[in-house]
Image: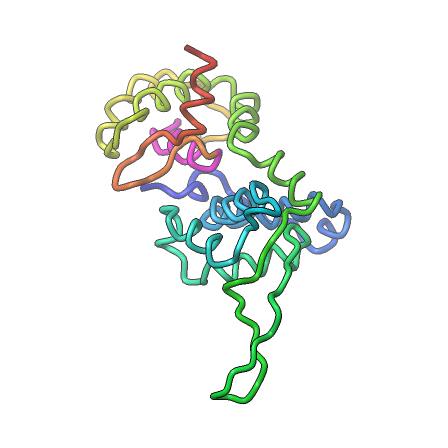
């Protein structure tokens, strides 16, 4: 399993550059700068965005949804810590339940598992810009010279769990014919470049093998 950071260096801007970013850009930076957490953050925002008064987004349910995502298995931080980061950044509104008296401690305690969350306008804007369809469209737009390789890999992994060796074999001819560019080393492009880029864009996910995500399949359908 490759990491997107091995193919594309995600360099965090210096403090002076951050100061010049808009609030929305800074929020997007929070999501993008740590690839391992990206899909977990977006999953939390997605759950909150689908909630309504009759079915509010409860913290326990959001954490449970995030924990089911493959990337959660590599996290040292709790899912609640990631939710708290989204609240601090102004992407989620948090409503705490009424405190309850605990006879053991003789104190009033707040059950954070029952806290509810709503997507803010800024959170909705981040979701729109970073949803997989948008990221995949941006990837294909930024690197048209590799579009055929991206499409081929999405098709190859659609509905299957593919090993690295299988992908290496599938993309061998594509990589041999691929043009050199500023995105890859002078030695040429490798199959891992395609998997890493598509993983970062939300088109592929590792589940004991590379497989195309639902979003990747939907995006692929426009090329059928």
| In the image, residue 81 above or below residue 73 | below
Q: Residue at x 52, y 83 (%)?
A: 102
Quarter of the N terminus within the rendering:
top left
| In the image, residue 206 above or below residue 222 | below
Quarter of the C terminus within the rendering:
top left
16 vs 45, left or right, is right
Residue 135 screen position, x and y as percent? 54, 31
Q: Nearer the viewer, residue 41 or 74?
A: 41
49 vs 103, left or right, is right
Residue 108 on the magenta segment: no
Specify the principal SS of the magenta part: helix
Q: Nearer the viewer, residue 199 or 158?
A: 158
Q: Residue at x 64, y 47 (%)?
A: 119
**Extent of the magenta region:** 187-201
Residue 199 on the magenta segment: yes
Residue 18 screen position, x and y as percent? 71, 51
Residue 109 screen position, x and y as percent? 56, 78
Q: Which residue is drawn at 62% across and 70% down?
A: 98
73 vs 88, left or right, is left
Residue 151 screen position, x and y as percent? 40, 19
| In the image, residue 129 above or below residue 103 | above
| In the image, residue 218 above or below residue 110 | above
The colouring scheme, among rainbow, by chain, secondary structure or one colour, is: rainbow
Q: Residue at x 30, y 17 (%)?
A: 173
């Amino acid at each position: 399993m490759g990491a997107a950071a091995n193919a594309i260096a995600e360099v965090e801007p210096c403090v002076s550059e951050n100061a010049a970013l808009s609030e929305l850009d800074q929020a997007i930076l929070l999501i993008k700068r740590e690839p391992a957490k990206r899909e977990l953050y977006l999953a939390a925002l997605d759950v909150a965005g689908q909630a309504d008064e009759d079915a509010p987004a409860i913290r326990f349910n959001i954490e449970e949804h995030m924990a089911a995502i493959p990337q959660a298995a590599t996290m040292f931080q709790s899912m609640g810590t990631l939710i708290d980061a989204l609240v601090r950044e102004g992407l989620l509104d948090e409503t705490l339940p009424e405190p309850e008296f605990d006879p053991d401690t003789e104190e009033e305690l707040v059950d954070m598992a029952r806290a509810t969350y709503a997507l803010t306008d800024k959170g909705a804007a981040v979701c729109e810009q970073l949803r997989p369809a948008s990221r995949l469209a941006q990837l294909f737009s930024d690197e048209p010279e590799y579009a055929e390789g991206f499409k081929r890999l999405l098709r190859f992994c659609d509905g299957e769990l593919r090993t690295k060796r299988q992908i290496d074999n599938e993309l061998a001819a594509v990589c041999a014919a691929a043009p050199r560019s500023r995105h890859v080393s002078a030695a040429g492009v490798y199959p891992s470049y395609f998997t890493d880029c598509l993983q970062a864009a939300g088109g592929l996910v590792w589940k004991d093998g590379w497989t195309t995500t639902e979003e990747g399949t939907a995006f692929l359908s426009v090329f059928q």
